[in-house]
Amino acid sequence: MAIRIGVVGGGIFGEMHLQTFSQCQRGGRCELVSLADLNENLLAKRREQYGVKTYRDYREMFAREHLDGVSVVTPDPTHLPIVLAALEAGCHVLVEKPMDVTVEGCREMIAAARKAERLLEVDFHKRYDPYHMALRESIETGKLGKPLYGYAWMEDRVEVPRDWWPNWACKSSPAWFLGAHFVDLFRWLIGRKKGRRVYATGVKNKLKSLGVDTFDCVQAKIDFEDDVSFALDTSWVLPSGFEAIVNQGIRVIGTEGILEVDSQDRGAEGCFKDRTHETLNLGFKLYSRDKLGNPRYSGYGFESIADLVENIAFLKCGGRLTDLQGKYPDGQDGLETTRILCGIHQSIATGKLVELGTD
Ligand SMILES: NC(=O)c1ccc[n+]([C@@H]2O[C@H](COP(=O)([O-])OP(=O)(O)OC[C@H]3O[C@@H](n4cnc5c(N)ncnc54)[C@H](O)[C@@H]3O)[C@@H](O)[C@H]2O)c1
């Protein structure tokens, strides 16, 4: 019962998907078949590294390879046509966050997945972090009481928008790139409630002066159903000397308790040649080697991608899509996060509080 997997987009984060599926392949869980990317040089490199078949055209890959599952790891504004084509080809899909940059695009994906009767999963990996799972447990079991409000922060070092992909950072923002994670996490913690209204501000200064026309920071206040409120700070201008590529955390306060998680500092730190002293988030991706010397990855960044394979295995063994409902970040979760993120950007543009619609 080989589960045939293809990846579209083999760039910086696409490599994490390739590493994950390679590891699943070594464990006999799937076959990492192919990669599609527009960049010929990158394809040659990934072919060498991962032994995958490569394609410049993802449509050709879908037509030839009879894939069970596809993960889409291309820049945010390009997800939609690729996801639709993958679903039309009969593949289950894992798409990187944000699922799409428009609510209409998310709706199209959901309708296509429904029609094709296929999985549509979004890579919201914060849900797979055991610390966050413990936080959810304390809410679900009532230990925290009724959630009243929460606060999260996620901040990247400046090299992310400046050096990693200056060409498409201007089509994104710290809210799209980083905020998507914590908006989904908070929604999930409080029982997948809908956002009702949002007010946000954003500042363009440093990155614009470096030639990347995007916000340095975005601050948002989101009101959810049932009087739960959430404040979110995002930015991607931390100096290169900061102790980690990302700084992040969350706190939730309920009628009966408080829980705070430092989602970045997990107690591991180090200093390596020509680098500053670093705090290492080994909870996200922990690299080691197995007995045979093969790479071994663990951590929530890996788990959330490998979940595509686990879900497909479940379906192939006779499980139904409805049995999985609520057990993975699905299209509706992707849509709700995009709705909130669109509201955030609308609020910044208008300077006004934005009422969020519902479907
Ligand atoms: N979950 C996370 O923590 C996380 C982290 C980083 C990035 N991401 C998301 O992953 C996605 C990719 O980010 P990245 O940093 O890898 O970007 P990247 O620019 O490094 O890589 C994107 C790749 O997609 C390829 N591509 C673009 N259009 C294509 C098309 N039509 N067909 C085939 N290939 C195409 C590009 O050639 C490039 O190699 C984005 O949606 C980003 O937001 C998620």
Image: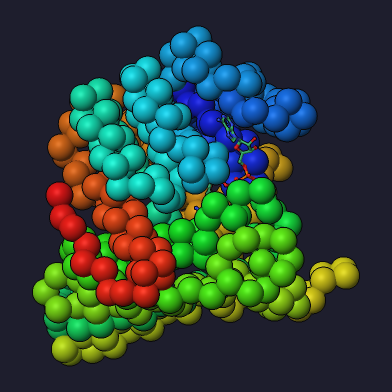
Observer-nearest of 223 and 31 = 223
| Above or below, 10 relative to 161 | above
Q: Position of residue 359 (x, y in %)?
A: 15, 49
Q: Residue at x 23, y 70 (%)?
A: 197
Residue 25 visible: no
Observer-nearest of 180 and 308 = 180
Q: Position of residue 207 (x, y in %)?
A: 67, 68
Left or right placement of residue 265 versus residue 211 in this view = left
| Above or below, 341 relative to 156 | above
| Above or below, 304 relative to 90 | below
| Direction front: furthest residue | 350
Q: Residue at x 67, y 60 (%)?
A: 212
Q: Residue at x 62, y 29 (%)?
A: 37
Q: Quadrant of residue 196?
A: bottom left
Left or right placement of residue 213 versus residue 194 in this view = right
Q: Residue at x 65, y 28 (%)?
A: 38
Left or right placement of residue 268 versus residue 96 in this view = right
